[in-house]
């Protein structure tokens, strides 16, 4: 099942990466994609899916596992199922001991996932901080209050009123221009910040 195993690998890598980025960095993913840990994280889940599918026929023929349901007899559809669900299946915990240590498939996940995600988040934090510093350097002619006013004036009116109000408040509460721009950046992304504070002409 080399073909289906490769499909399962590719689907698992893609789904794992998209899930992490959308959950943690939906608007600022560009600062996370340079992290080596992100690709190792996705690769691990991809390899797990690959080896599950690689040995699937042997396990099924020996009666170790039994799969039923729509498309279960089609190796290509099965590859999609495994690729999509392998991460969720590995997060199953049978019970918890001590201070919250999981026992079950999730035990394997805890060997690598926390450290890798921490590395991704740190790279994202560093690159985002450096980017915001470059934006602040473009605003040397503006006061902190002028920067805040420009940010709040460019929050679109179609946002739900509670979200818009909370965003405006967070910007106003920021103690530095860096903090205010970061609040806006986290919500609207890099392109929106570039439009507000474009590079000066050479």
Image (cartoon, rainbow, N blue to C red):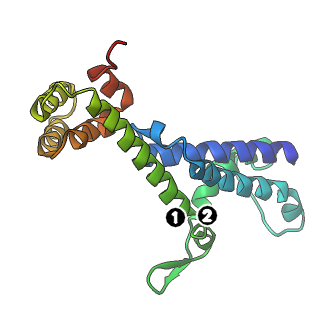
Give the mark, 1 or 2, whose residue is nearer the N terminus.
2
Tag shown at residue 5: none
Q: Is residue 120 left or right of residue 27?
A: right
Residue at image coords 17%, 35%: 164
Instruction: Return the x and y of residue 45 as percentages of the image width and height.
Output: 66, 55
Q: Is residue 16 left or right of residue 54?
A: left
Tag shown at residue 90: 2
- Is residue 74 at least partly visible in the picture? no
Q: Would you call the spot at circle 1 few (<14 residues within 10 Å), some (14-19), or many (20 or more)?
A: few
| Observer-nearest of 86 and 121 | 121
| Observer-nearest of 155 and 144 | 144
Which of discs 1 and 2 lies nearer the camera? The answer is 1
- Image quadrant occupied by the C terminus: top left
Q: Would you call the spot at circle 2 few (<14 residues within 10 Å), some (14-19), or many (20 or more)?
A: some
Q: Is residue 146 left or right of residue 3?
A: left
Residue under numbered circle 1: 114
Instruction: Return the x and y of residue 2 as percentages of the image width and height.
Output: 87, 46
Instruction: Return the x and y of residue 6 as percentages of the image width and height.
Output: 79, 44
Tag 1's secondary structure? helix
């Amino acid at each position: 099942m080399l073909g289906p195993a490769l499909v399962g690998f590719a689907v698992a890598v893609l789904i794992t990466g998209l899930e992490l980025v959308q959950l943690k960095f939906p608007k600022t993913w560009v600062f996370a994609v340079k992290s080596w840990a992100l690709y190792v994280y996705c690769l691990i889940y991809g390899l797990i899916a690959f080896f599950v599918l690689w040995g699937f026929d042997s396990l099924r023929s020996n009666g170790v596992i039994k799969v039923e349901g729509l498309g279960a007899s089609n190796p290509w559809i099965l590859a999609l199922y495994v690729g999509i669900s392998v991460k969720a299946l590995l997060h199953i915990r049978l019970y918890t001991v001590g201070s919250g240590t999981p026992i079950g498939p999730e035990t394997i996940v805890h060997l690598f996932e926390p450290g890798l995600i921490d590395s991704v988040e740190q790279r994202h934090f560093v690159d985002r901080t450096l980017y915001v510093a470059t934006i602040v350097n473009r605003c040397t002619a503006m006061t902190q209050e002028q920067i805040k006013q420009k940010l709040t004036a460019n929050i679109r009116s179609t946002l739900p009123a509670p979200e818009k109000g909370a965003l405006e408040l967070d910007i106003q509460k920021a103690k530095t221009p860096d903090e205010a721009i970061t609040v806006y950046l986290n919500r609207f992304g890099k392109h929106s910040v570039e439009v507000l504070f474009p590079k000066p002409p050479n």
